[in-house]
Image (cartoon, rainbow, N blue to C red):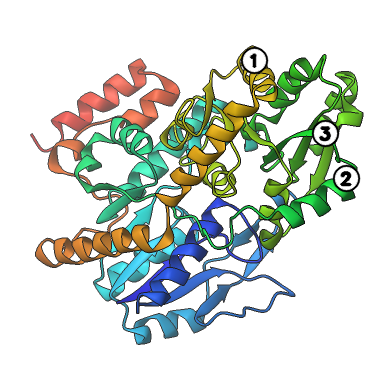
Amino acid sequence: MRIGIFTNTYKPDINGVVRSISTFRDELDNQGHTVYVFAPEAPGYEDEEYGVFRYPALRLPVADNYPLAIPVSPQIDWLVPRLKLDIIHSHHPVLLGEEAVTFAKKLNLPHVFTHHTQYEEYSHYFPINQNIVKTLTREVVRLYLVRSVAIIAPTASMRAQIAAQHPTIESRLRVVPSPVNLEHFRFKPDEGAKIREKYQLKNTFVFVSVSRLTPEKNVSTLLQAFARAASGHPDARLMLVGDGPLRHELELQAKRLQIADRVTFVGSVGYMEVPNYLSAGDVFAFASTTETQGLVTLEAMATACPVIVVDAPGNRDVARHEENGLLVQNSVAGLATAMRRIMKDEALRKTLGEGARQTAREYSAPVLTRKLVDTYQEAIETYRNAPLDYKRFSRDAEESRHFPPQWLTEITGTTEWFDSLSAFWKNLGS
């Protein structure tokens, strides 16, 4: 099978989407498929893998300097039809996601989309009325979903959430979790010891967390919980791996909480180094409530690290309470109680660590890649029997007569002005 992947972020940037694409791609290659990746340019970075084609991009000083792809490339426009693709797979609903649908329409190919992100939870990056941003975001996603032959959700809870928001596309939803590279993410005691020595963490109890330092990751709550849990435990430490726009604010918060000397802000580290930092921790702690799968939690589990995560979609799909970790309420008190408990109970840590390792094995790349290929094959057959209308604003007959559209009334409310227009719309052509 020949597969075209369109993504707004790729190497050298590292995040959950990139790790998912990269791991799947490596295993698709191993299983005899050919994969081409279309991504934003990365100045100064040279691709070592075959078949990566880059669009022009801008680097913006927000969101960890992720590139903003410019979906214009005559070279790629010439190239794609000549690659003889069987299927197109996109990972974002805008920018290069639109390019993916455009090529699917031109080449008469099935388009598959992976719904990686709870997009509405990122509305705070737009400093305008949040109701407007969330509603428009929901409509943009809806318009994209209806132009996808199959929609992949990384977890069952995300599938349920998408289906509840967009019931008309429920039959197209499939659950295919992102895989974990078990060869890469494994316990590395020697490397972990070096990290502990580097940051003066010998003979301490280390909670480690890996995430961007952004509002949606809820790191502020984790800091407050650690401050409470560490009281009376002088050897407790917290190591935060990752960077982001909130770093300075979080450093100030640690000072206010009088734990600055017990919290290590590591900053960004390369993908190859992440297992070393996980191996340096005794417990993985994660307070994010916006995960679609919690891939970083699974990566921690692969290193046999017990986890403490808040009870939220994505997290609860991988964390099993008192089996591979502790699933707690999203509160300072809930997290702090779990942290104190796990520090005191060595037998519990050992049990949860072994459970974590076993859970990670369920997400091995070969098994999940075969499931992805099955989804591709099903999409190809479905599209062959019933080609999809890729027009962006296509509506069924009943929906096209409805004015104002639901998303617009959510923003503005129904007014007399809308009522009069609505009456005109309904009478038009009757």
Query: Disc 3 or 1, which lies upstream in sequence?
Result: 3
Judged by depth in the image, the label closer to the viewer, 3 or 1, is 3
Location of residue 8 by image quarter: bottom right
Q: Could you tell me which quadrant the C terminus lies in?
A: top left
Specify the label residue 204 is tagged with: 3
Q: Position of residue 12 (x, y in %)?
A: 66, 66
* Mark 3 element type: loop
As measured in the structure, the alpha-carbon distance from the residue carrying label 2 to the one carrying label 3 is 11 Å
In the rendered structure, which amino acid carries the disc numbered 1?
Answer: Thr
Residue ID at (62%, 20%): 338
Q: How many marks?
A: 3
Judge whether residue 246 can be spotted in this image.
no
Specify the label residue 199 is tagged with: 2
Judged by depth in the image, the label closer to the viewer, 2 or 3, is 3
In the rendered structure, which amino acid carries the disc numbered 2?
Answer: Tyr
Q: Is residue 316 left or right of residue 229?
A: left
